[in-house]
Image: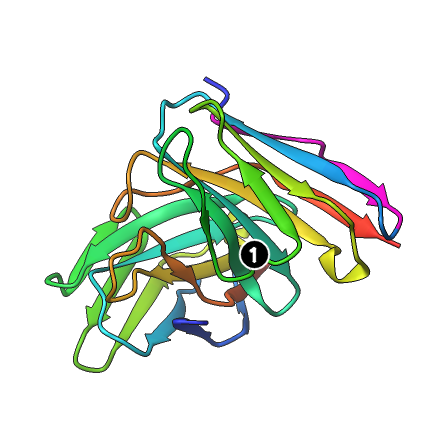
Amino acid sequence: NAGVTQTPKFRVLKTGQSMTLLCAQDMNHEYMYWYRQDPGMGLRLIHYSVGEGTTAKGEVPDGYNVSRLKKQNFLLGLESAAPSQTSVYFCASSYKQTPYEQYFGPGTRLTVT
Amino acid sequence: SQQGEEDPQALSIQEGENATMNCSYKTSINNLQWYRQNSGRGLVHLILIRSNEREKHSGRLRVTLDTSKKSSSLLITASRAADTASYFCATDPPVRDDKIIFGKGTRLHILP
């Protein structure tokens, strides 16, 4: 039981490049989330999904897109990376909405130059 | 929009001492959760307290909730080096829109 996994762990992009971050969970959770963590800002929700085939915007969705084609996977895309998107990205999943706890992946450290 | 605010931002204590950190929030909540984040890792859930509960224990952790003051505290007793981490509170806002909101965290450093 791997829990929540994220790939890649590290990535450096040039401004304007695109990439996709993959999150996978093996706990059969309905809900999945993408957060970004910046120094002094805590975690901010980018997008989330309440089930296969669904997505919804969080607090800071601009510049990102997501897809949840399979229940176990949640993809985060950056179409045209900007230096402001330099951050650590965390994926999380939960059985259902609060009060169920969220399980977090190890994070992806992204640098955009 | 930040719902919870932890206090202090950083805390250093000697190993064996108790550590207390606080979380204040702005609007009514259904539940409040505490998470721990070790350096370079993802967050790990510690404990959840519901709005109708006043105190909850889990091992060396004690969480209190005062809904009249819109605040919660996390007490770690007999601290250990392994407790060095950041601690976040997370609240669910009054509108049930499937999200919880994390505070900015308290960085706890346990000195040997």
**Residue A82 placed where, x, y %?**
79, 57
**Residue A59 placed where, x, y %?**
49, 62
Q: Residue at x 36, y 56 (%)?
A: B100
Q: Residue at x 27, y 48 (%)?
A: A98
The answer to if A11 sits in the magenta stretch is yes
**Residue B68 placed where, x, y %?**
16, 81
Q: Amino acid at mark 1?
A: Pro
The mark total stands at 1
**Residue A95 placed where, x, y %?**
31, 34
Residue A85, placed above or below residue A51: below
Q: Is residue A5 left or right of residue A32?
A: right
The answer to if B28 sits in the magenta stretch is no
Which residue is label 1 attached to? Answer: A61
Q: Residue at x 27, y 61 (%)?
A: B63
Pick whichever, B30 or B1, lies toward us. Answer: B1
Pick whichever, A91 or B105, lies toward us. Answer: A91
Q: Is residue B111 left or right of residue A31?
A: right
For disc 1, the neighbor class at 10 Å (few under 14, some 14 to 19, many from 20) is some
Q: Quadrant of the C terminus of chain A?
A: bottom right
At mark 1, the secondary structure is loop
Q: Quadrant of the N terminus of chain A?
A: top left
Tell me which segment is drawn in magenta. A3-14
Please identify the quarter of the rendering in which residue B64 is found: bottom left
